[in-house]
Amino acid sequence: MSDLTSGTAAARAGVNLETLRYYERRGLLPDPPRSQGNYRLYSEDAVRRIRFIKRAQELGFTLTEIKELLTLAESVDAECSDVRQRALDKIRDVEQRMRDLTRIKRTLQKLAAPCPGSSELDDCPILQALDDGRSK
């Protein structure tokens, strides 16, 4: 077990120090042991765990979902199918967000199309539509 300071562990994991501390507060990292000088000391396993968290975030997993994945990874009773199900659930979430974003894009296009871009702000059709609730 190599004892790394907070700053070194954060740098090796590619995050800033506040991110590391945030993960600790959220329960994603166990409380690290402390040196005689009361400095937090991290292992290479902690660095690996932080990298895992960041990669999972990049794939769209929330911190709550990542905590579930970490719990599964450490469970003696969990199976690969449990993790696969979480991935399939995330795919469905992503597909729904894509549909939502497509709908939002279409609505914005409809709002922007009639706007000449040169009228007075009081005559802005985009602001009027938003104010009137016609943006739906």
Image (cartoon, rainbow, N blue to C red):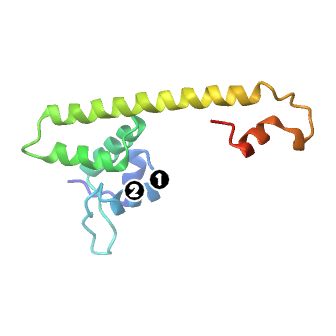
Residue drawn at 24 percent across, 47 percent down: 68
Classify residue 135 as left or right of residue 48: right
The local secondary structure at tag 2 comes to helix
Q: Are marks 1 and 2 in contact (CB under 8 Å)?
A: yes
Image height check: is 113 above or below 76? above
Give residue 130's position: percent from left, percent from top: 72, 42
Residue drawn at 32 percent across, 66 percent down: 40
Residue drawn at 38 percent across, 59 percent down: 6
Q: Which mark, residue 20?
A: 2
The amino acid beneath tag 1 is Asn
Classify residue 110 as left or right of residue 22: right
Q: Which residue is mark 1?
A: 16
Category of crowding for the residue at label 2, using alpha-carbon neighbours closer than 10 angstroms: few (below 14), some (14–19), many (at least 20): many
Q: Looking at the rendering, in which quadrant would you find the N terminus? A: bottom left
Residue drawn at 34 percent across, 44 percent down: 53
Category of crowding for the residue at label 1, using alpha-carbon neighbours closer than 10 angstroms: few (below 14), some (14–19), many (at least 20): some
Q: Quadrant of residue 27?
A: bottom left
Q: Looking at the rendering, in which quadrant would you find the C terminus? A: top right
Give residue 57's position: percent from left, percent from top: 39, 41
Residue furthest to the left: 77
Residue closer to the observer: 114 or 14: 114
Classify residue 51 as left or right of residue 75: right
Q: Quadrant of residue 42?
A: bottom left
Residue closer to the observer: 117 or 69: 117
Q: Quadrant of residue 56?
A: top left
Image height check: is 42 above or below 51? below
Q: Which mark, residue 97?
A: none
Residue closer to the observer: 45 or 132: 132
The amino acid beneath tag 2 is Leu
Give residue 131's position: percent from left, percent from top: 74, 46
Image height check: is 112 above or below 18? above
The local secondary structure at tag 1 comes to loop
